[in-house]
Amino acid sequence: MARLYEYQGKQLLKAAKVPVPQGEVAATPQEAKKIAEKIGKPVVIKSQVWAGGRGKAGGIKFAEHPLDAEITANQLLGMEIKNLKVEKVLVEEKLDIEKEYYVGVIIDASKEARAPVVMFSTEGGMDIESVDSEKIARVTVDVLRGFRLYDALNLCVALKVPTRVLPSIAQAIMGLYQTFKGYNCRTAEINPLVLTKAGKILAADCRISIDDSSVFRHPELGIDVAREAPTPPTEFDRIAWWIEEGDLRGTCYIAQMAPDKKGPGYVGYHGIGGGGAILGVDALNRQGLKIANYADTSGNPTAAKVYRAAKVILSQPDIEGYMLGGFIVANQEQWHHAHGVVKALREELPKRPGFPSVILLCGNKEKESMEILKEGTTDLLGQNPIEIYGSEKVYETEFLAKRMRALIDEYRKKREIKG
Ligand code: GDP
Ligand code: MN
């Protein structure tokens, strides 16, 4: 699920005729001040990070005057809210809140439903998970019939919303649903949908995430990595994503795990198959090693794709070893992996004398794969230790992690003597 920031989500809502507070996004305190001047009333300054509960975490503050706005924005920018760095703040008119509502659309993927579910609650402002289920009205959308205005009205009526605000709340629910549908969302949420003391309905917050597979349909959103991730992509993540973006045969998923690596013990990790890959990570951790990146090439990727993945993994300057963790007897033809890995090792290892590799590759065409790996790396062995294993070792995660550890220890010793 590719996430949008609150300010991006609000632009979509506005286009769908859901009223949003007047405001703009700022990357510097000076910009924040200018926006506050333009608004000309007290403002709320909101950290733009991919997390809910920013209010409680100190990421949402109020300012009476433009100068306050500048000072407050200066405090928030660069701060960490829920471990996420604040790079932008949204400066908006402060609302005079009479009541907070909740509206959300999610996909119910269960066999009985397989459809969007629209939810509405009179208890907005807090986590919907902690709201009493009697205070949440919901409707599963009949996708052939669609979601109509009277469905939205029914949700409000079920919770006895006062008649005077019924039409504007129903309109906001409709707008959220249309946004959800139009942008192929996985989730879309307005929390809170605010009723102001002056009787207006506005979306005061919103969280939207787009289905990864639909991101390509919406280039205007500027999402550069269509992947579920808790944090914005690093440069490494972006480069890794280009591999996948340009070639959808098989999977290549690579994520940087420790962007600010400090100290030794990091392995460039190349897993095959999600669960199997994790077994390898666990085994490495037990030997006191960490993974610099997580990677998964599976689902019959081409040799070109595997090669690119291995190149990206081996591009990390501060790793002490490379592990191909194929802890899975895969039915894909493994010679594609063998070819790709050999090519990458042949290009990269000469740059790193002594740098060790442990390779486990099992599955279909294993015999041929072993030959490719061995023939393709024998002339490198004088400089670089490379250990190659097949299905005889697929259960022996501990043994393989210990081999990685032993080779890394030798590599360190050699470097100490040299250095
Ligand atoms: P979240 O904590 O990340 O969900 O951020 P929200 O944007 O939902 O803000 C959290 C809470 O701050 C809201 O539920 C409101 O109670 C309060 N808040 C946000 N914007 C305003 C505003 O303009 N006026 C007032 N009075 N309260 C606000
Ligand atoms: Mn909220």
Image (cartoon, helix red, strand yellow):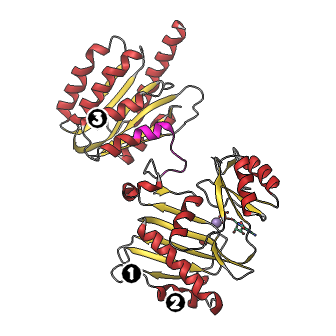
* Figure quadrant of residue 393: top left
State yes or no: Cβ of the residue under disc 3 lies below 8 Å from any atom of ligand 1.
no
For residue 364, side relative to residue 135 (left or right): left
Which residue is depicted at the point 45% across and 47% down? 224
For residue 135, side relative to residue 267 (left or right): right
Tell me the CA gap for discs 2 and 1: 15 Å
Image x and y of residue 281, in percent: 45, 39
Q: Dot 2: few (<14), some (14–19), or many (≥20) neighbours within 10 Å? A: some
Magenta-drawn stretch contains 238: yes
Which residue is depicted at the point 36% across and 32% down? 310
Q: Of helix, strand and loop, which one carries label 2?
A: helix
Q: Of helix, strand and loop, which one carries label 3?
A: strand
Q: Is residue 158 visible?
A: yes
Amino acid carrying label 1: it is Gly
Q: Which residue is mark 3?
A: 361
Magenta-drawn stretch contains 401: no
Amino acid carrying label 3: it is Leu
Q: Which residue is mark 1?
A: 146
Tell me the CA gap for discs 2 and 3: 57 Å
Residue 154's mark? 2
Amino acid carrying label 2: it is Asn
Which residue is depicted at the point 62% across and 60% down? 52
Q: Is residue 355 above or below residue 361?
A: above
Q: Quadrant of the C terminus?
A: top right
- The mark that comes first in sequence, 2 or 1, is 1
Q: Nearer the viewer, mark 2 or mark 3?
A: 2
Q: Which residues are magenta?
A: 229-240
Mark 2 and mark 3 residues within 8 Å of each other at the beta carbon: no
394 or 187, which lies in front? Answer: 187
Q: Is residue 280 visible?
A: no
Tell me the CA gap for discs 1 and 3: 49 Å
